[in-house]
């Protein structure tokens, strides 16, 4: 069924345009011009997606969004806003909007966002439904959740032996792969028999029981090597509602303690038990499947949420970029005047006392510094296009180091490297990575005005919490400088935060470094013990090297 | 003595650039703060070089540049963009030429401006 979209915008022309474009893409679209009407519509009909203007006549868009989410928590919402105010849009996202788009918008971008949001909505609904089902299961089958299948089967078998007063018994289940019966739990049988028994359906007593789904009572099979008198075999058949009859396996019981044969009554009792057992086993399986599905869905939703966060992040950055460009232009003009004015003063006052000359010089320096800050700001606004290539980390670091040593004289500082012997490859933009290494090294050098040691280590690791279990490489740069005060640690990555105001720090180095590393799906971590050791860890995902690629393709 | 025409709507900026350049004794600087009738102004003054801002209230500096190139009597006059729209870093990376035109980023040090003018003026 086509997804249903409700569109709210007070501008008729936008409504018409969107209804037509989305309609052409196969969506069912209804449009209204204000939030209250939208709320009424949503109470009456079920929609998958709401596209709404944030600024609506009469009512506050944020308030409407809140109400709508109360009425239909499954609905996804895309905000279109004429104001690119990030605060408002972020507030909307916080309430549960999927994304926001600034006017004037690019139709292709809007369509892509619509598609993403509907995809997420589909997952969310399934997730909610399964969660409800799960809750039901948890109420009725709490016992099932707490035990393993083996414990469960052992309990069933022990009950069966108790009912029939028998010495030996086993439960065989159909193996999902080869459809043969295997012993899952046994009493009075040797480990060899347990491990090696494979019974085809329709073969042997249990096999026939399973095939015919009917109990079998064999009074005397003395010739058989592992039974002494009679054998009772009862099929385990699931009759779960909504699913086809399904043969799960069989319960085999032999050797009554009394040495007599099994009775019809015992067969009936065991059949009742088998019926209950089959339901329990089936529930156990369903429960596990459900749990697996829920985990899968949870992961899918987590991934979608992550993608959404990244989308917001990039949108925010784009807005920051536009903002920075505007500011840069406005600030650089007055900076030009100040610098020109200072140079004018120098010309007009050639013989003034040195105090005034120093003052003029300081103002000029400050002006140029302000200009550097503006330039750094603009690096976000117009980030150079990145060129991703596969690099070996040792090569990358050594290149950066030689460049660094060339540019920064290091008389009192010793740099030591400790690279892993393994060749580790990462996919990165060389220039950006060098910029990061440069920033970190520069920080280290500036933290050690009286000299000290820098150690660069590389190693491979797997960090579970890092969302995947793929191997990662860590580039760790340790210095013996003054370190970072505990209260400053949380602020390190904030833009314009610097502890080097007096040394011309712009407060953008680490901010930019983190952005670059995160854009490469990595992380930047800093730990510090002041006056002892400060460690900066750059964690990046490893990619296969060239040779490994070949290996993979030939196999 | 070289005659320079400075076209920029920032009056204070023009004031200092004019004074700083003229203080060297090598330049005569005319300032034009408006962005209309520029071609007439150029024809009237016949400068040796034009310093041109890009972002001005009514006209874009690049449009003015196109106009200058269009007319036979103005197309030989060299012009340089002097603008806050670009960064020193960006211009230096490209040897100061962007799209075939020479750019100077604001704020600019007077000595650098003088060197550049001397390179380009007729």
Image (cartoon, coloured by chain):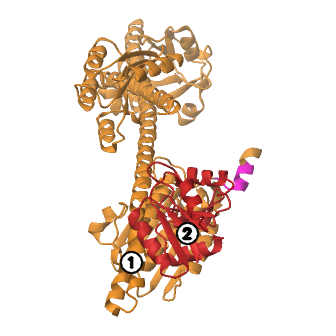
Chain colours: A orange, B red
The answer to whether residue A505 of the structure is visible from this angle is no
Given residues A335 and A145, the one toward you in this image is A335
Q: Position of residue B110 (x, y in %)?
A: 49, 76
- State the quadrant of the C terminus of chain A: top right
Of the two numbered discs 1 and 2 in the rendering, the one whose residue sits closer to the viewer: 2
Hey, which quadrant is residue A260 in on the image?
A: top left
* Subunit of label 1: A
Residue at the right extreme of this rendering = A554
Marks 1/2: CA–CA distance: 21 Å
From the image, give the main secondary structure of the stretch colored magenta: helix
The reply to whether label 1 and label 2 mark residues of one chain is: no
The answer to whether residue A426 of the structure is visible from this angle is yes
Residue A424, numbered circle: none
* Subunit of label 2: B
The residue that disc 1 covers is A342
Q: Position of residue A457 (x, y in %)?
A: 53, 71
Q: Residue at x 58, y 55 (%)?
A: A542
Vertical placement of B112 versus A425: above or below?
Answer: below
Hey, which quadrant is residue A73 in on the image?
A: top left
Given residues B27 and A223, the one toward you in this image is B27
- Residues in magenta? A544-551
Q: Residue at x 57, y 18 (%)?
A: A222
| Local secondary structure at mark 1 | helix
Residue B4, numbered circle: 2
Given residues A444 and A221, the one toward you in this image is A444
Q: Is residue A90 left or right of residue A520?
A: left
Q: Residues within 10 Å of mark 1 (few under 14, many from 20)?
A: many
């Amino acid at each position: 069924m086509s997804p249903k979209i409700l569109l709210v915008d007070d501008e008729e022309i936008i409504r018409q345009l969107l209804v037509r474009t989305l309609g052409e893409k196969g969506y069912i679209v209804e449009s209204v011009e204000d939030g209250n009407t939208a709320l009424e519509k949503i109470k009456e009909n079920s929609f998958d997606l709401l596209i709404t203007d944030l600024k609506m006549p009469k009512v506050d868009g944020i308030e409407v969004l809140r109400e709508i989410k109360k009425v239909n928590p499954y609905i996804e919402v895309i905000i279109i806003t004429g104001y690119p105010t990030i605060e408002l849009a972020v507030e909307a996202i916080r309430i549960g909007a999927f994304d926001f788009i600034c006017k004037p918008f690019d139709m292709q971008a809007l369509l892509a966002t619509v598609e993403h949001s509907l995809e997420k909505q589909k997952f969310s609904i399934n997730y909610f439904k399964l969660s409800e089902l799960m809750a039901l299961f948890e109420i009725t089958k709490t016992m099932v959740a707490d035990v393993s299948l083996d414990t469960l089967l052992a309990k069933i078998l022990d009950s069966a032996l108790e009912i029939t007063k028998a010495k030996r018994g086993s439960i065989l289940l159909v193996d999902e792969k080869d459809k043969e019966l295997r012993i899952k739990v046994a009493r009075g049988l040797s480990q060899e028999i347990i491990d090696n028994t494979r019974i085809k359906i329709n073969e042997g007593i249990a096999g026939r029981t399973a095939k015919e789904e009917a109990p079998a009572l064999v009074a005397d099979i003395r010739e058989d090597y592992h039974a002494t008198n009679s054998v009772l075999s009862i099929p385990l058949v699931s009759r779960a509602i909504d699913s086809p009859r399904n043969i799960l396996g069989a319960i085999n019981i032999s050797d009554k303690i009394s040495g007599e044969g099994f009775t019809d009554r015992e067969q009936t009792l065991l059949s009742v038990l088998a019926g209950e057992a089959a339901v329990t086993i089936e529930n156990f399986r369903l429960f596990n499947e459900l749990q697996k599905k829920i985990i899968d869905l949870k992961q899918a939703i987590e991934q979608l949420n992550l993608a959404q966060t990244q989308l917001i992040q990039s949108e925010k950055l784009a807005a920051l970029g536009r903002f920075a460009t505007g500011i840069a232009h406005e600030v650089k003009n007055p900076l030009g005047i100040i610098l020109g004015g200072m140079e004018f003063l120098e010309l007009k006052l050639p013989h003034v006392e040195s105090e005034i000359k120093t003052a003029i010089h300081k103002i000029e320096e400050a002006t140029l510094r302000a200009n550097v800050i503006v330039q750094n700001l603009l690096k976000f606004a117009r980030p150079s296009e990145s060129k991703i290539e596969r690099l070996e980390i040792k090569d990358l670091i050594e290149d950066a180091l030689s460049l660094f040593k060339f540019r920064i004289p290091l008389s009192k500082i010793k740099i030591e490297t400790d690279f892993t012997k393994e060749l580790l490859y990462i996919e990165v933009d060389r220039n950006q990575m060098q910029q990061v290494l440069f920033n970190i090294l520069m920080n280290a050098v500036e933290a050690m005005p009286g000299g000290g040691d820098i150690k660069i280590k590389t190693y491979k690791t797997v960090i579970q919490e890092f969302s995947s279990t793929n191997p990662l490489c860590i580039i760790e740069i340790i210095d013996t400088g003054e370190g970072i005060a505990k209260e400053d640690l949380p602020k390190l990555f904030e833009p314009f935060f610097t502890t080097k105001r007096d040394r011309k720090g712009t407060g953008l180095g680490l901010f930019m470094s983190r952005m670059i590393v995160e854009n490469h799906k990595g992380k930047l971590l800093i730990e510090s013990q002041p006056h002892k050791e400060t460690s900066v860890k750059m964690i990046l995902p490893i990619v296969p090297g060239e040779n490994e690629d070949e290996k993979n393709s030939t196999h | 003595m070289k005659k320079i025409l400075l076209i920029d709507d920032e009056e204070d900026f023009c004031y200092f650039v004019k004074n700083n350049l003229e203080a060297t004794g090598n330049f005569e600087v005319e300032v034009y703060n408006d962005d209309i009738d520029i071609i007439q102004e150029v024809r009237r003054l016949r400068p040796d070089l034009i310093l041109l801002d890009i972002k001005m209230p009514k006209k874009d500096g690049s449009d003015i540049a196109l106009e200058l190139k269009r007319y036979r009597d103005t197309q030989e006059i060299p012009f340089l963009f002097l603008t806050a729209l670009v960064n020193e870093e960006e211009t230096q990376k490209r040897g100061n030429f962007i799209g075939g035109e020479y750019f100077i980023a604001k704020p600019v040090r007077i000595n650098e401006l003088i060197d550049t003018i001397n390179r380009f003026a007729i």
